[in-house]
Image (cartoon, grey):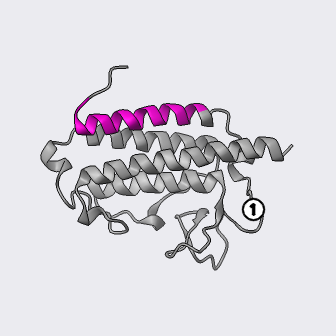
Amino acid sequence: MELRTDRVGLLLDQLETSVEFSRTRLRGLTDDEYFWEPAPGNSWTVRRRLDGDVDVYGKGDWIADFSPHEPVPPPVTSIAWRVAHLIACFTLRWDWTFGDRRMLFDDLEIPHTADDAQKVLWEIVDRWKEDVDRLTEGQLDTVGFSQFPAGLDPTVPFIAIVWWLNRELVHHCAEISLLRDLYRENVK
């Protein structure tokens, strides 16, 4: 693989190699692993919607736990929650950069199987990479090129958002890999 040396090329190469590693680590993920709560009763996860649910996001029958102010200490999360979070990050940032600029957390369909979640995640990451790769240097340096209202997007150059999403993918896929290891060793 020949690495690019331009600014966005380096970031996209980093994203691509991180995706390749993560796809390998997620291969064979089961629904039992996907929904496993490492801290039963004290984990954030993806679950069926119940009447009166608060501090959740997603439309339809499946939601992901959420709080506008992260609890201290932060909750332990399931693989399902981590994947849903990544889908939200990439989908909402894509929409507010390249789409209609109107999607919010409650507009997201939350996948409820390990296979569907991976399919959705890799599709939105691929779409993100393709559209980011088409940007000009001026667009990459434009403050507020992405207008996603629930982040720093309107206040930083767009290339910082590209960097941030790479960091999110690396961070959460590493945690997902560890959760798979813990599941394998603790749930028999």
Q: Position of residue 135 (x, y in %)?
A: 20, 42
Q: Is residue 9 magenta?
A: yes
Please name the predominant secondary structure of the magenta segment in the image: helix
Q: Quadrant of residue 95?
A: bottom left
Q: Which residue is mark 1?
A: 39
Callout 1 secondary element: loop
User: Is 71 situated left or right of 185 in this image?
Assistant: left
Report crowding for label 1: few under 14, some 14 to 19, many 20 or more residues within 10 A (C-alpha): few
Identify the magenta region.
5-24
Point out the residue furthest to the left here. 138
Front position in the image: 26 or 119: 26
Q: Position of residue 24 (x, y in %)?
A: 58, 30
Point out the residue furthest to the right here. 188
Residue 146 seen by the camera: yes
User: What residue is rendered at 67% in x and 33% in y?
Assistant: 28
User: Is 158 situated left or right of 73 in this image?
Assistant: left
Name the amino acid type tagged 1: Ala
User: What residue is rendered at 59% in x and 74% in y?
Assistant: 72
User: What residue is rendered at 22% in x and 61% in y?
Assistant: 144
